[in-house]
Amino acid sequence: MPYFDAASAAPLHPVARQALLAALDEGWADPARLYREGRRARLLLDAAREAAAEAVGCRPDELVFTSSGTTAVHAGIAGALSGRRRVGRHLAHSAVEHSSVLHSAAAHEAAGGSCTEVPVDRFGAVDPAAFGGALRADTALACLQSANHEVGTEQPVAEVAALCAEARVPLLVDAAQSLGWGPVPAGWSLLTASAHKWGGPAGVGLLAVRKGTRFSPQGPAGERESGRAPGFENLPAIVAAAASLRAVRDGAAAEAVRLRALVDRIRSVVAERVPDVEVVGDPVRRLPHLVTFSCLYVDGESLLHELDRREFSVSSGSSCTSSTLTPSHVLKAMGVLSEGNVRVSLPPGTAGADVDRFLEVLPEVVAEVRERLGAPVSAPPSPAPAASLVVDALGRRCPIPVIELAKVIGEVAVGATVTVLADDEAARLDIPAWCEMRGQEYVGEEPADRGSAYVVRRLS
Amino acid sequence: MPYFDAASAAPLHPVARQALLAALDEGWADPARLYREGRRARLLLDAAREAAAEAVGCRPDELVFTSSGTTAVHAGIAGALSGRRRVGRHLAHSAVEHSSVLHSAAAHEAAGGSCTEVPVDRFGAVDPAAFGGALRADTALACLQSANHEVGTEQPVAEVAALCAEARVPLLVDAAQSLGWGPVPAGWSLLTASAHKWGGPAGVGLLAVRKGTRFSPQGPAGERESGRAPGFENLPAIVAAAASLRAVRDGAAAEAVRLRALVDRIRSVVAERVPDVEVVGDPVRRLPHLVTFSCLYVDGESLLHELDRREFSVSSGSSCTSSTLTPSHVLKAMGVLSEGNVRVSLPPGTAGADVDRFLEVLPEVVAEVRERLGAPVSAPPSPAPAASLVVDALGRRCPIPVIELAKVIGEVAVGATVTVLADDEAARLDIPAWCEMRGQEYVGEEPADRGSAYVVRRLS
């Protein structure tokens, strides 16, 4: 049962498991107490902090342990914004940050702050100059992930950090996806990470705040972790997180080379064997283990379900998958196709044979789902070219609106238009993406009685 | 090495350990995912929620798992206050709540809300009528612990809940210390608890919010746990918490009887064998496993240190212990002696022989510390009665000011006064408490150039 969703959660690393077991026996007491069990817990906590700080590249007293990567981001952003409140209440962040950053930004706006979302290119990366341009005299904080969690693209952190330093704006780097692979380039003021992404246990996040960064913890006061993370320390999990970070890092360079080759193979073979597919994300400046692609005329949920039946566990940024009904904000910001989206993220140790089998199974699965949905399999038939056409896909969910469009585009004359009436949110993203993939012109969107009318002009 | 500090953290219950290990293998994946590892995690999460809800006495959809008891309290109070903001911004709570409640109240006041602290009697319990009297037309929330974490006194939760219902004010019950022993009396609207207090792992708190209670989660939006607890679920720990709660409850009734007898023994033997001791807390309406006493003329840190040398791990609400320099707010609110304070909280399974040994060791230890500090060992000598005296204990830390007072009280005539100059915060609490224990009159406190002047009249 190959598990290819390491970017969601990695299985527990053996070193983490071992350290956790030992710390359950040695580290359950309150590290603030004076008796021997407490002193022992304190020693373990101090050692874990030193090990994690070394991996992060900061001083131990700059690092606290939070209860998750999400709470680290929430606490980091809120504390930095409040600490710099006198400077201003503006927050700059990329459009493809993790939801914990975007939710923090939304909360900041709801409380009267202002935000600038820096757009990304089609690979998902910000332009450093554009990011620099978003920094203002009243900017309290800038946030940029080290690498994107959905498409794997690395952000130009060093360049952006230099611009932030010049503008005297602290930079928070969300390193959740990359910290297991190596340290973040220097220049950050705050850094966040999440242990269960590198093979540590759930329940541990990291928040590092460089000395000299103005920081004012929000929420009720707390006695633990320098007042930056409330509640009793989850010590066994902290010990396991620190131990596994060190272990993962020891093997990271070699494993990165191996997984990078496997991902390159996926990138090229998927593009080769699956018709009408878009492999997204930067092919070079990227995480070693992660690749994302989208398949036209396929819905994400069916694809995931069929892959799961064949024992492959992957995730998707499509709408209509699991709990979400809107397509991934990352794919949206990149302007790439979101339908039939698959994210493959390989845990360390992934066998090449499993990847090969995935590449055999995938084209069949995609073809099957397409056939079931009645998607066009080859060039669409060309009867007598009609005048402009209207396709009613109201009430139909992704990928049906695009399938209907693809079916009739050959029926109108070159230069004529097809108007697709649709009320599924994904259509707004996927119809323009289809046009770009197919060399047709996306004229635009018009409001309609229900949903929207998407107008496409046939060019070829 | 008898560990008698279960109220801080209990060692991991064997069932918790077993469940944690199993869930590390079965429950590391994201329960929001569709693939088999995710579905398996979801099943474990659902089962844990059902088991915990049954123990709490609520519906599974009323219960969320937080990252600690502290975060459960923070989230519960903030959410309830915000949900009832239209009613008003007043919060009522007892004076002896856990610091997580008091810190939440302080944050609420800092944000413009108002609070009423309901006092407690000398046993540490609130008077229901007084609590009811603190409820106002603009009271958004009332908070009352099920039992006190420092002295073990049970609060009249059922009576207060009835008054809250009458006043249509939701009641949050912090059940951190009692939930392992049994359910909280009905009538609460919100309930919080902490797994590592009942032998579950660190990193898990419970927050139950009854249907119909207005609740508006604060902080950035979250997708997990109904938006009430941010971050990836710490599933293995959650599974272990739920399993151990059930296991602990199964044996709770029998173990409570056994520990209650051991605590009764401590209460009577300490009072018998240790001179100048005050055993505090309600002797009957109390937690089965917890007892607290204070020893005159002893400082908490020395006492803890000497007990630790003899392999007993206990905690203290005295000032000058571990990280704190102010005496426990609980002892302060009760008006009892805080110096030489010791809290003994027995974990389930505590051997009677360990308690016996503790009761042998304790009198020696107290005597030793007193001797080292030059405390009076018997009735003080009576030279020719002097007129009123002034004792300068400025710059001297607890318990020196009380020791100096005790040394000279016999030197003044009955009816004359001793004035103690002291700048240690604990003196404000301990001098009146000493007077009450000794049958002397505490006249009052006067401001002085440095610190305060505490005036005591000799009555006998």
Image: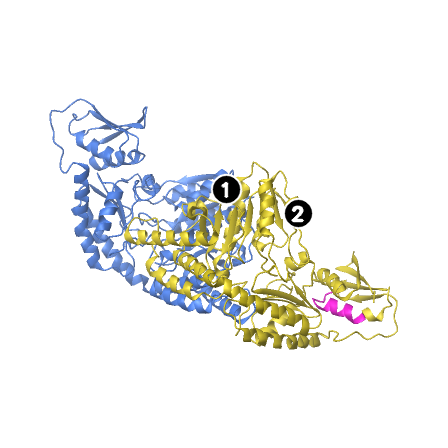
Chain colours: A yellow, B blue
In this picture, is B290 found above or below B134? below
Q: Position of residue B48 (x, y in %)?
A: 45, 65
Could you tell me the amino acid type at mark 1? Phe
Q: Going by the image, does B364 lie left or right of B200?
A: left
Q: Position of residue A333 (x, y in %)?
A: 67, 56
In this picture, is A68 found above or below B97? below
Residue B277 visible in the snapshot: yes
Residue at 88% in and 71% down: A385
Disc 2 chain ID: A
Disc 1 chain ID: A
Residue at 21% in and 43% down: B277
User: Closer to us: mark 2 or mark 1?
Assistant: 2
Query: Which residue corresponds to mark 1?
Result: A215
Residue at 44% in and 51% down: A53
Badges 2 and 1, same chain: yes
Q: In terms of secondary structure, where does tag 1 sit?
A: loop
Per the rendering, the mark at residue A129 is 2
Q: Residues within 10 Å of mark 1 (few under 14, many from 20)?
A: many
Residue at 32% in and 61% down: B252
Q: Looking at the rendering, in which quadrant would you find the C terminus of chain A?
A: bottom right
Per the rendering, the mark at residue B419 is none
**Which residues are drawn in magenta?**
A394-408
Residue B169 visible in the snapshot: no
User: Relative to the observer, which residue lies in front, B130 or B97?
Assistant: B97
Could you tell me the amino acid type at mark 2? Ala
In this picture, is B206 found above or below A301? above
Among the two numbered marks 2 and 1 on one chain, the one whose residue lies closer to the N terminus? 2
Q: Main secondary structure of the magenta part?
A: helix
